[in-house]
Image (cartoon, helix red, strand yellow):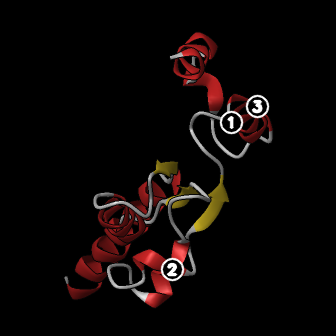
Amino acid sequence: MVICLVMKFNMINLFKNIIKFIIIMKYLITGITGFAGPHLANVLLKEGHDVYGLVRGSNGMETDIMDIVDANDFDKITFLYSDLRNFRTLTNLFKKKIFNSSNINKNFLLNIYHN
């Protein structure tokens, strides 16, 4: 009976790890150095996701979030430097296949750029 329970427990943990591995996503947080950005990064990192933070060079530095994001988690964030208004940099960013761009609508990006 004890062996059966241990095997069942191990199988449950195995399935949890498989599910966790399958649903890891790559998230781009625009405004990572703002108020909500580092808090969102903490949540996503705790869930095991990959986090990329977009930092606007004129407005912030990645070290601005070190008081909110733990040092170990800080090292897990990949920082990218651009501005949302810079259409060329954003399109190059998505062309590099860093993110799953299947849900990115080019017209949406064009509207952001022209407004």
Lateral position of residue 38 relative to residue 84, left or right? left
**Which residue is identified by label 3?**
88
Q: Which mark is residue 45?
A: none
Earlier along the polypeptide chain: callout 2 or callout 3? 2
Q: Residue furthest top?
A: 107
Badge 1 vs badge 3, beta-carbon distance below 8 Å: yes
**Which residue is identified by label 1?**
90
Lateral position of residue 52 relative to residue 42, left or right? right
**Which residue is identified by label 2?**
63
1 or 112: which is nearer to us? Answer: 112
Badge 2 vs badge 3, beta-carbon distance below 8 Å: no
67 or 40: which is nearer to us? Answer: 67
| Residue at (57% x, 54% y) in the render | 56
- Residue 74, given in percent of the width and then of the height, sits at 50, 79
For label 1, the SS is helix
Q: Within 10 Å of the Cα at label 2, are there few (<14), some (14-19), or many (20+) other Cα atoms?
A: few
Q: Amino acid at mark 2?
A: Thr
Earlier along the polypeptide chain: callout 2 or callout 1? 2
- Residue 64, given in percent of the width and then of the height, sits at 44, 76
For label 3, the SS is helix
Q: Amino acid at mark 3?
A: Arg
Q: Amino acid at mark 1?
A: Leu
> What whole-number distance in Å separates the C-alpha atoms at marks 2 and 1?
22 Å
Q: Within 10 Å of the Cα at label 3, are there few (<14), some (14-19), or many (20+) other Cα atoms?
A: few
Count all numbered tags in the image, as a single digit.
3
Vertical placement of residue 24 versus 76, above or below: above
Badge 2 vs badge 1, beta-carbon distance below 8 Å: no
- Residue 37, given in percent of the width and then of the height, sits at 36, 59
| Residue at (46% x, 89% y) in the render | 71
> What whole-number distance in Å separates the C-alpha atoms at marks 2 and 3?
26 Å
| Residue at (59% x, 10% y) in the render | 107
